[in-house]
């Protein structure tokens, strides 16, 4: 198992270094336009936050997997974990905000020792869509997680899980040896309690990230291919597939540089830039909360340490009026969300 | 002086061919886009055909483009290689089937 960039003492563990790379070179010498200038061409700069719809909470960077493309640089060696006190502060906001979606992510959110308490409390609030982003293998990682499908069902959690491909080779290459078999087993167990069934209210969606330096294909076609392969080969059902573009940050940036794909990938992102996606990018209706309670426009900005441009910096000081209309923090990684049909934690945006 | 005939950067300039013949260039690109739409054959199947033909035509631009296209569509490397073997089989078959012509000629001329 590879180690996190932080554990390896990689220079890319420093978000400032990542931002330097994304601003220098081809973006400094004018070969490619900076994101700010690109969206200005269609009068879309500055990007501003609209009404909050999705509160995404990162409950910690610890994970049982070390995926090669992980934008969080998550892994077993990461110790950043949200405390119950910060969770309580989040719950206060969830109760008082009009956001229709609560989205728990990590790391593997289930590894937070207060995860179950948080889910139980949050489910009482009654948000319309309560998402947990589960990496699937956690369900098979240890006996104490075996009952997660039942636990999710009890709290009517919407499960969204990563699945880079319907073949073992591609999946294990991106996410680690043995991940495919465990993921298949976990999906079958989720199906067994009712998740992903055609008429079931127990939502099970999959997320597809390309396993390399290329962009995702058409979401509708990919979903068709995934559904056919998973039902034919394993009898697995799920509802929707979300295709997500890998953003050039953290471990994926490290991979791009090491494999000498960085410049070509940035060219591909800029070439696929679609101005129609800009109005719908997730940072305009989402607020991302870090494990220590700080606020960001999205999970990617959280990892780049680009906090919200607002007087309100922490969940304990949450103020909807002050946050609405704030200017979104951007850099060249944002091209990842505006390429092709666009990309967000809920898949394509157009 | 340019040292090689092929430059990967030229692929991105493909669209510029319309600059010297706008009507024909546009007609070509419209046709091209239409061909690759979902039809009786899926766009995925068409991508694999294009990849195989790219190799039989030995077009480096097309190989670059349709390898990327295949990856984006989730096509596996095993499927890609299988498609190439179809192209290679037809190429080698096309060579060998002309052997019949050679045999005919030999049979006609030899005592």
Image (cartoon, helix red, strand yellow):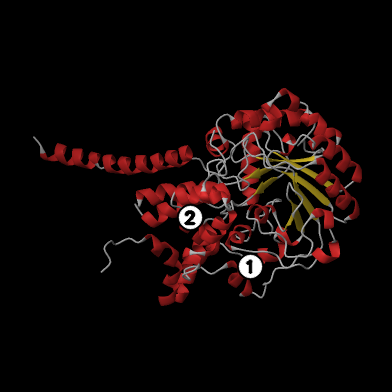
Q: Nearer the viewer, residue A72 or A54?
A: A72
Residue B42 visible (yes or no): no
Q: Is residue A160 left or right of residue A252?
A: right
Q: Nearer the viewer, residue A165 or A98?
A: A98
Classify mark 2: residues with Cα within 10 Å, few (<14), some (14-19) or many (20+): some
Q: Position of residue A262 (x, y in %)?
A: 48, 55
Q: Position of residue A255 (x, y in %)?
A: 50, 47
A140 in relation to B30, above or below: above
| Residue at (72% x, 23% y) in the render | A143
Q: Which mark is residue A275?
A: 1
| Residue at (88% x, 40% y) in the render | A121
B8 in relation to B25, above or below: above
Q: Is residue A233 left or right of residue A307?
A: left
Q: Chain of mark 1?
A: A
Which quadrant would the C terminus of chain B be assigned to in this image?
top left
Q: Give whichever of discs 2 and 1 has the lower sequence position.
A: 2
Q: Which mark is residue A262?
A: 2
Residue A324 visible (yes or no): yes
Q: Are marks 2 and 1 on the same chain?
A: yes
Give residue A171's quadrant in the image. top right
Q: Position of residue B40 (x, y in %)?
A: 57, 49
Cα separation between marks 2 and 1: 23 Å
Q: Is residue A299 left or right of residue A9?
A: right
A264 in relation to A122, above or below: below
Q: Nearer the viewer, mark 2 or mark 1?
A: 2
Q: Secondary structure at mark 1?
A: helix
Which quadrant would the N terminus of chain B be assigned to in this image?
bottom left
Q: Secondary structure at mark 2?
A: helix
| Residue at (53% x, 44% y) in the render | A9
| Residue at (53% x, 61% y) in the render | A20
Q: Position of residue A29 (x, y in %)?
A: 46, 70
Q: Chain of mark 2?
A: A
């Amino acid at each position: 198992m590879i180690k996190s960039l932080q554990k390896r003492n990689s220079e890319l563990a420093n978000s400032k270094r990542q931002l330097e790379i994304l601003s220098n070179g081809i973006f400094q010498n004018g070969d490619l336009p900076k994101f700010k200038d690109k969206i200005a061409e269609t009068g879309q700069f500055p990007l501003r936050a609209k009404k909050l719809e999705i509160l995404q909470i990162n409950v910690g960077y610890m994970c049982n997997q070390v995926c090669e493309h992980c934008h969080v640089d998550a892994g077993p060696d990461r110790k950043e974990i949200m405390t119950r006190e910060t969770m309580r502060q989040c719950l206060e906001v969830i109760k008082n905000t009009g956001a229709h979606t609560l989205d728990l992510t990590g790391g593997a959110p289930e590894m937070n020792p207060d995860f179950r308490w948080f889910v139980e409390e949050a489910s009482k609030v009654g948000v319309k869509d309560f998402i947990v982003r589960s990496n699937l293998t956690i369900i098979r990682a240890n006996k104490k997680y075996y009952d997660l499908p039942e636990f999710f069902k009890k709290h009517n959690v919407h499960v969204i899980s990563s699945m880079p491909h319907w073949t073992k080779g591609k999946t294990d290459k991106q996410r680690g040896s043995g991940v495919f078999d465990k993921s298949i087993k976990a999906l079958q167990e989720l199906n067994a309690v009712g998740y992903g069934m055609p008429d079931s209210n127990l939502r099970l969606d999959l997320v597809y990230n390309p396993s390399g330096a290329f962009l995702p294909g058409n979401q509708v076609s990919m979903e068709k291919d995934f559904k056919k392969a998973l039902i034919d080969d394993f009898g697995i059902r799920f509802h929707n597939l979300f295709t997500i573009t890998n953003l050039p940050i953290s471990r994926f940036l490290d991979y791009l540089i090491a494999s000498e794909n960085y410049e070509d990938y940035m060219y591909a992102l800029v070439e696929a830039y679609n101005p129609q996606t800009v109005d719908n990018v997730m940072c305009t209706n989402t607020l991302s909360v870090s494990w220590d309670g700080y606020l960001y426009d999205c999970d990617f900005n959280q990892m780049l340490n680009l906090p919200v441009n607002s007087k309100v910096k922490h969940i304990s000081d949450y103020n909807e009026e002050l946050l609405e209309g704030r200017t979104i923090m951007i850099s060249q990684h944002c091209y990842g969300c505006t390429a092709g049909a666009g990309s967000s934690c809920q898949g394509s945006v157009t | 002086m340019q040292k090689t005939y092929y430059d990967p950067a030229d692929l991105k300039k493909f669209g510029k061919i319309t600059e010297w013949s706008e009507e024909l260039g546009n007609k070509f690109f419209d046709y091209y886009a239409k061909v690759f739409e979902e039809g009786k054959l899926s766009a995925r199947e068409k991508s694999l055909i294009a990849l195989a033909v790219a190799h039989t035509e030995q077009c480096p631009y097309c190989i670059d483009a349709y390898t990327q296209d295949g990856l984006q569509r989730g096509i596996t490397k095993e499927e890609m290689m299988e498609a190439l073997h179809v192209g290679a089989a037809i190429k080698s078959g096309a060579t060998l089937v002309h052997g019949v012509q050679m045999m005919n000629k030999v049979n006609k001329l030899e005592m």
